[in-house]
Amino acid sequence: MKDKMMNFTIIIPHKNIPLLLERLIKSIPMRDDLEIIVVDDHSDSKVVEKLGRIERKNLTKILNKEGHGAGYARNCALPLTKGKWVLFADSDDFFNDGFNDFLNEYLDSDADIIYFNANSVDSETFEPSNRVNHLHEFIEEYHKDKGHGELIMRYLFTEPWCKMVKRELIESHHIKFEETSIRNDVRYSYLVGHYAKGIVVDNRQLYCVTTRKNSVSRGMGRQAALDELKVFAGWKKFFMDHKILLELPKFDLCLYNFTRHLWKDNSLFRIEYCVLRKAGLSHGYIIWQILKYVKKSIGYKL
């Protein structure tokens, strides 16, 4: 029997929040041409049992035996996707009314990426939050100055949600997520943005990003800080190599903290230096940055 045509694939990494995952799945329109791939990142055994009771047309569940994070989970799903378009959602978020109309409208679009807007609320109280203010600003800039705004959408909007990407683009450029403890979605996002021949930016708020007390994105230990430095350094190197004239204030802050460690935590400074070098940044560039921040600190306490 010939496989039915899939136009859309939604990939969802999950860990230990089955009720919120079910809420997300219920928000996705029921369509014969849409598949959902849930990748469980080694949830507790009782949670896995609950996952087994979630049923849905065209739903595939992958149960990882070890926890390697959301980037690894998303990479597990990518080779299995059948849809013409690929979207990502976080398991504690959900789609808003109008999403089905959006899918119908852009099914045959010539663009490689369709970006869309979002709102944000507290996951329990549904009180508004500010997690997507940056996306609102990016889209506003796009409509005000399309040239500059397009660069921002392509290279600075780094969350995996709110973008519908042609699967052919992902596969032809072998694009994957970094398997870091934090910021695993940055490289995927700027690479699909870079290689997309055409993009569309839709202003409708079709996705809801929630805020939770125990969210994975909250808090940062030493390893997460090193992973963030690695990701941001690779981001900066990509900009330098491709002559992309955009500022990366997040990376600048990392370099500021890195410079402080020269005398506050010399062992950490040496580790971070190696991270910057492995990202491809030259000794000369790193030293120049150190001198720049030391010079800025004259008369101030770093």
Image (cartoon, grey):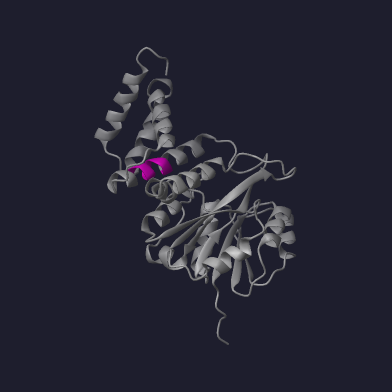
Q: Can you say whether 235 is above or below 71 in the image? A: above
Instruction: Give residue 124's quadrant in the image.
Output: top right
Residue 196 on image: x %, y %: 39, 59
Q: Nearer the viewer, residue 125 or 69?
A: 125
Residue 161 on image: x %, y %: 55, 53
**Residue at coordinates 28% horizontally, 47% vertically from top-left?**
241
Q: How many marks?
A: 0
Residue 158 on image: x %, y %: 47, 48
Residue 302 on image: x %, y %: 42, 19
Q: Nearer the viewer, residue 65 or 120?
A: 120
Q: Nearer the viewer, residue 79 or 249?
A: 249
**Residue at coordinates 54% horizontally, 44% vertically from top-left?**
136
Q: Residue furthest front?
A: 144
**Is any atom of residue 68 visible in this view?**
no
Q: Residue furthest left?
A: 284
Residue 33 is a magenta residue: no
**Residue at coordinates 37% horizontally, 58% vertically from top-left?**
195
Main SS of the magenta part reads: helix
Instruction: Give residue 282's quadrant in the image.
Output: top left
Q: Residue furthest top?
A: 299
Quadrant in the picture for the N terminus: bottom right
**Is any atom of residue 204 visible in this view?**
yes
Q: Is residue 169 left or right of residue 32?
A: left
- Magenta part of the chain: 231-237
Q: Nearer the viewer, residue 197 or 21?
A: 197
